[in-house]
């Protein structure tokens, strides 16, 4: 039944595009080119905690390329041509110099695969004021709140959305007593703050909180330090904040009490995961693997959504003009298929893409948030992260 429905939707979409391409005079003209820049920094290969996970040097780029290919399939009928030009800045180079020299005044649309500080530095450049930046890498809540920028749209769920997704699932399972373990990096502390916010929001109780300060040599820690470290009062679930995977992978099966591990390891919250196969996801998973020779990573998914969002807006607005494109992207009419069970759209108050969040174990998809039963007056997707009344973002879309 699902396959028949998908085939019917594809046929309807094809007939719609064929009809408008026949009736609308714009399509009788030469193809309209829409140029997109992809900006990233060369990745430094860091020591791996495990030999099981190969270092992926091109996260993001392959997703953008797949999105461009899909856009141009539609563009055959709509008279539009989408072009992607990549700019990979060397480690010793400057992303600001690259943007000013090679991108400014040449590309209105820029997919940015950089960290939070670099992203806002670019967004604040005078040369970027007439550009639209698609952030496909950051998770920072501050970028969607007090540090938001009116020329930036965010494609991946921020930490608050991920923490809320986990909290909803734990509430459903009645795992209300948390043992929170936090790493020592700044990112770990940010994730921990998001988890604390979610615990308060959904009525959970953090019964114990500890910072992991042991050695990261697994041979020394896994059999002794973890057991001793986790000898605390009773709790329902161990919630871990370890974004760099320095110790979290070793917590499973080694804690003093037999409890599930959730957070950055164990059961994780993610925009995309290799175990996801529903709602047509298996097709895009396979197409990506054929193209890239590897699994799709979150940055790939974010970059794919960025190009597809542009393609959808350009098709519906019949334009490449940035004001029309941005207005459509932030309008209630915009809806994007993200292969996760619900149409995706941008929050008009902070530029964050509202989306379902996958809850996945290493080899299985466990649930998709929002969890059934969590309601919202406009859309259940806004039960994840900062709703409009909670937002500290001050920008007004233009």
Image (cartoon, rainbow, N blue to C red):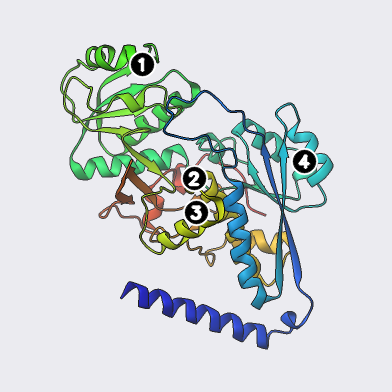
Whether residue 316 appears in this view of the structure is: no
Asked which secondary structure carries label 2, the reply is: loop
Q: Earlier in the sequence, mark 3 or mark 2?
A: 3
Which numbered tag is attached to residue 133?
none
- Element assignment for label 3: helix
User: Comparing marks 3 and 2, which lies closer to the viewer?
Assistant: 3
Q: Please give the residue where the numbered disc 3 appears in the rendered image.
A: 289
Quadrant (top left, top right, bottom left, bottom right) of the C terminus: bottom right
The residue under the point 81% across, 52% down is: 106
Q: Quadrant of the N terminus?
A: bottom left
Do labels 4 and 3 touch, CB within 8 Å?
no
Q: CA distance from mark 4 to mark 3?
A: 31 Å
Determine whether the residue tagged by mark 4 lies in a helix, strand or loop. helix
Which residue carries the number 4 mark? 99
Query: Which residue is tagged 1?
Result: 212
**Who is closer to the viewer here, 307 or 324?**
307
Which of discs 2 and 1 lies nearer the camera? The answer is: 2
Asked whether the beta carbons under mark 3 and mark 2 sit within 8 Å of each other, the answer is: no
Relative image position of residue 121 (x, y in whole percent):
70, 34
Against 275, is 333 above or below? below
Q: Give the Cα separation between the discs numbered 3 and 2.
A: 11 Å
Give the Cα distance between marks 1 and 4: 39 Å
- Residue, disc 2: 297
Does residue 128 appear left or right of residue 260 in this picture? right
């Amino acid at each position: 039944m699902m396959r028949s429905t998908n085939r019917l939707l594809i046929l309807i979409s094809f007939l719609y595009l064929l009809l408008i391409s026949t009736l609308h005079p714009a399509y009788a003209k030469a193809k309209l080119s829409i140029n997109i820049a992809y900006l990233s920094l060369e990745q430094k290969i860091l020591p791996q905690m495990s030999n099981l996970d190969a270092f992926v040097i091109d996260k993001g780029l392959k997703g953008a390329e797949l999105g461009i290919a899909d856009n141009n399939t539609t563009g055959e009928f709509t008279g539009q041509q989408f072009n992607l030009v990549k700019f990979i800045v060397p480690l010793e180079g400057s992303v600001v110099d690259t943007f000013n020299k090679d991108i400014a005044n040449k590309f209105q649309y820029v997919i940015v695969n950089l960290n939070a500080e670099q992203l806002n530095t670019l967004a604040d450049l005078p040369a970027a004021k007439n550009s639209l930046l698609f952030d496909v890498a950051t998770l920072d809540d501050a970028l969607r709140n007090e540090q938001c920028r009116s020329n930036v749209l965010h494609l991946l769920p921020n930490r608050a959305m991920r923490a809320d997704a986990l909290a909803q699932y734990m509430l459903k399972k009645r795992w209300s007593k948390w043992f929170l373990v936090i790493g020592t990096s700044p990112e770990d502390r940010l994730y921990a703050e998001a988890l604390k916010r979610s615990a308060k929001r959904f009525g959970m109780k953090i019964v114990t909180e500890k910072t992991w300060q042991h050695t990261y040599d697994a041979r020394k820690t896994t059999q002794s330090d973890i057991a001793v470290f986790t000898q605390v009062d009773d709790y329902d679930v161990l919630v871990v904040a370890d974004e760099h995977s320095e110790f979290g992978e070793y917590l499973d099966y080694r804690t003093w009490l037999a409890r599930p591990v959730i957070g950055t390891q164990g059961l994780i919250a993610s925009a995309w995961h290799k175990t996801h196969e529903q709602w047509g996801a298996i097709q895009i998973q396979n197409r990506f693997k054929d193209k890239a020779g590897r699994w799709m990573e979150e940055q790939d998914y974010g970059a794919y959504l960025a190009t597809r969002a542009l393609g959808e807006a350009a098709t519906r607005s019949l334009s490449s003009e940035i004001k029309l494109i941005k207005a459509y992207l932030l309008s209630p009419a915009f809806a994007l298929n993200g292969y996760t069970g619900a149409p995706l759209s941008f929050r008009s108050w902070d530029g964050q893409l509202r989306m379902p969040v996958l809850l996945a174990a290493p080899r299985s998809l466990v649930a998709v948030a929002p969890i059934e039963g969590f309601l919202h007056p406009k859309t259940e997707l806004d039960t994840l992260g900062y709703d409009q009344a909670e937002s500290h973002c001050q920008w007004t879309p233009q």
